[in-house]
Image (cartoon, grey):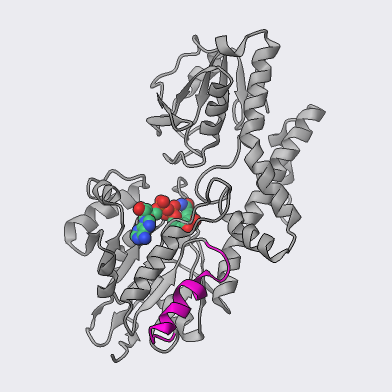
Amino acid sequence: MPEARVLEVEAPAARVPVTRVETAPATIAVVGLGYVGLPTALALHAAGAPVIGIDVSERRLLAIRSRDVDLPRTDVLRLEGALGDGRLRLSSIPAAVAAADAVIVCVPTPVDEQRRPHPAALRAACANVVAHARAGQTIVLTSTTYVGSTRELLVEPLAERGLRAGEDVFVAFAPERILPGDPTVQQRAVPRVVGGATARCTARTRELLAPTADRIHTVSSLEAAELTKLYENTFRAVNLAFANEMAGVSAHLGIDPVEVVDAAATKPYGFLAHYPGPGVGGHCIPVDPYYLLEPLRGDGVAAPIAEQAMAAIEARPGAVAERALSLLRGRGIAWDEATALVVGMAYKPGVADARESPGLAIAEQLHGAGVDVAYHDPRVAEVRLAGERVLRSVPQPTPAPFDLVVVTALHDGAERAWLDDCEHVLDATYRVRLGRNRHLV
Ligand SMILES: NC(=O)c1ccc[n+]([C@@H]2O[C@H](COP(=O)([O-])OP(=O)(O)OC[C@H]3O[C@@H](n4cnc5c(N)ncnc54)[C@H](O)[C@@H]3O)[C@@H](O)[C@H]2O)c1
């Protein structure tokens, strides 16, 4: 099949490429419409591309069609427009990738219960893309994954089908750096790293992603792009673990840790502020470093700083719960007679996502110790404790019924004056005003 050469339209940074054969905007398939894939699909649609959004979950597609999605307002408006104009098509049929000129893969890359990479969704999505690939397609992997994934799951199986990267198809890795929950950081304002299987693959991908990013930084290989993402998120994990450690040091010395971080952050070079907290949640920082560490363990390569940081991150919610229990014990309150309110079930302020949430881990540990636990989070209506007991958010908490309030995430703009009247507060966010009976971890 002849290759459809990609031409630029008038404003290459703002519009999608067109194919010369069809002189129409290239159709782009986005595989996986989660926290990353849906905003990506909307950004490409906003740049003029016809987009096929593919997700194996009918439930997710229904939620998208019903506009029941956790997105910033600008993206909700984009979704409204995209669903209305027919240029965004949604499908649960994996083979729909065959109709696209370019395919962007954004499926989840979780870990299993032993914290080992569990890339089953990635393997399935890539196998499907390979099975339906056709000459001329640009295929971009954006999921965070182990070094070597793009070559192993795309480049090599495509070659086995007779589709050579850089000649017949164009394959690249371009890690996503979206920051959910912070409307001040626009997806397109964050530079995009791209590493192709060949220079032509990099160039094609650069052109494809130009409408979604103001700046694109290219690297020399697929593997360099893959390692860039793992380095970034492991860097953050190490620094967050160290921030928690320094918070303990500050507490030991009777010093406010946040005052110290803020002061250190006035240094214009050589310091990057990281703040302590209840633990690290979400889909990225508690997970991604294992995609670096597990293969290294297999190769017998030591990475002790990253290993220790991840161990500290995993232990952090437990340390908060222990502190809560010891505060109750110190006041002579038996755990099985105690009541506690956890404030914040989202993994961080600004999101409705409770995946890997420290608030949930802390609530589970308190519940396991016999404490009667409730929670308040205006963005998370319901959670399941240890896979069993369902808890619903207390809509408007009052201080009265709780022996201890444990603060784990405070959403901007949420009403929190009632916290001032709570008698005993354990503040794991380091954001509550200090005072009598205000405890840090
Ligand atoms: N969420 C973030 O903040 C963030 C930021 C940067 C990078 N990432 C990375 O991006 C990737 C996607 O993360 P996410 O948070 O969007 O995940 P998500 O869980 O929110 O969404 C993934 C979607 O993919 C769908 N899916 C799973 N298998 C599929 C398949 N075989 N074919 C089609 N659809 C499939 C799921 O149904 C789900 O809707 C991960 O590798 C993650 O590490 C996430």
For residue 5: magenta? no
Along the line of sight, which residue is nearer the eye, 432 or 251? 251
Segment colored magenta:
145-164
Report whether residue 49 is seen: no
Quadrant of the drawing holding the N terminus: bottom left
Where ligand 1 lies, by image quadrant?
bottom left
Q: At which x and y percent is residue 45?
A: 29, 64
Along the line of sight, which residue is nearer the eye, 9 or 243? 243
Q: State left or right for residue 194 relative to residue 65.
A: right
Residue sitting at 57 percent across and 53 percent down? 116
Q: Write down the quadrant of residue 333 in the picture.
A: top right
* 199 shown above or below 66: below
Quadrant of the drawing holding the C terminus: top right
Q: At which x and y percent is residue 71?
A: 36, 47
Along the line of sight, which residue is nearer the eye, 400 or 254? 400
Q: At which x and y percent is residue 293?
A: 65, 58
Query: Farthest residue toward the bottom?
Result: 2
Q: At which x and y percent is residue 95?
A: 27, 69
Q: State left or right for residue 260 relative to residue 289.
A: right
Residue sitting at 49 percent across and 10 percent down? 401
Residue sitting at 73 percent across and 30 percent down? 256
* 434 shown above or below 357: above
Report whether residue 212 is seen: yes
Query: Farthest residue toward the right?
Result: 253
